[in-house]
Amino acid sequence: MKVITIKQPWASLIALGYKTYEFRTWKTKYRGDILIHAGKGIDKEAMRIFKHLNLAYPKGEIIAKAMVTDCIFVNEEVGEKLLKKDPLVYYNLKNWKGFGFKLENVQKIKPIPINGKLSLWEYNGEIKI
């Protein structure tokens, strides 16, 4: 199954349903199931912003399963719409341009310790929800 590695706190925010798009500078034609891997890196600014949620932020683990249903170009107009939808989660889209992977049907899974990789990568092991 395809996997995408995401820095914390973003991986946990996806796993818990707060964030419905993952942003990249590259687009993908891939649609279908994907695993969310919480990488070992963190976004320090975002960790401060979401500190009040008191969430767990595991690192180096696959923590959720989702479905990629779309990949949209994020321009100023799209960024503004997402910012209006949730100004806390999408605060950093003001002047950002790139692609947003729409994630739906997110389910937390039993964590799987594993090192991440760049881009989309494959995991062939067992998944327990």
Image (tube, grey):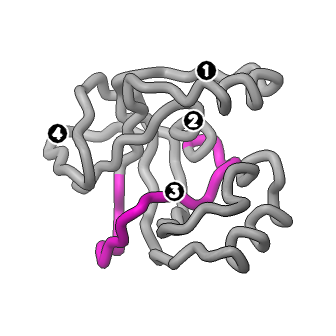
**Residue identified by numbered label 4:** 125
Mark 2 packing: few (<14 Cα in 10 Å), some, or many (20+)? many
Tag shown at residue 12: 2
**Residue identified by numbered label 1:** 56
Q: Position of residue 35 (x, y in %)?
A: 36, 48
Q: Amino acid at mark 2?
A: Ser
Q: CA distance from mark 3 to mark 4?
A: 23 Å
Secondary structure beneath label 4:
loop
Q: Is residue 38 above or below residue 33?
A: above
Q: Earlier in the sequence, mark 2 or mark 3?
A: 2
Q: CA distance from mark 3 to mark 1?
A: 19 Å
Mark 1 packing: few (<14 Cα in 10 Å), some, or many (20+)? few
Q: CA distance from mark 1 to mark 2?
A: 7 Å
**Residue identified by numbered label 3:** 22
Left or right of 57, for residue 62 = left
Q: Position of residue 55 (x, y in %)?
A: 68, 23
Q: Amino acid at mark 4?
A: Gly
Q: Earlier in the sequence, mark 4 or mark 2?
A: 2
Q: Earlier in the sequence, mark 3 or mark 1?
A: 3
Asked if residue 76 lies in the magenta stretch, the reply is no
**Disc 1 or disc 4, which is closer to the eye?**
1
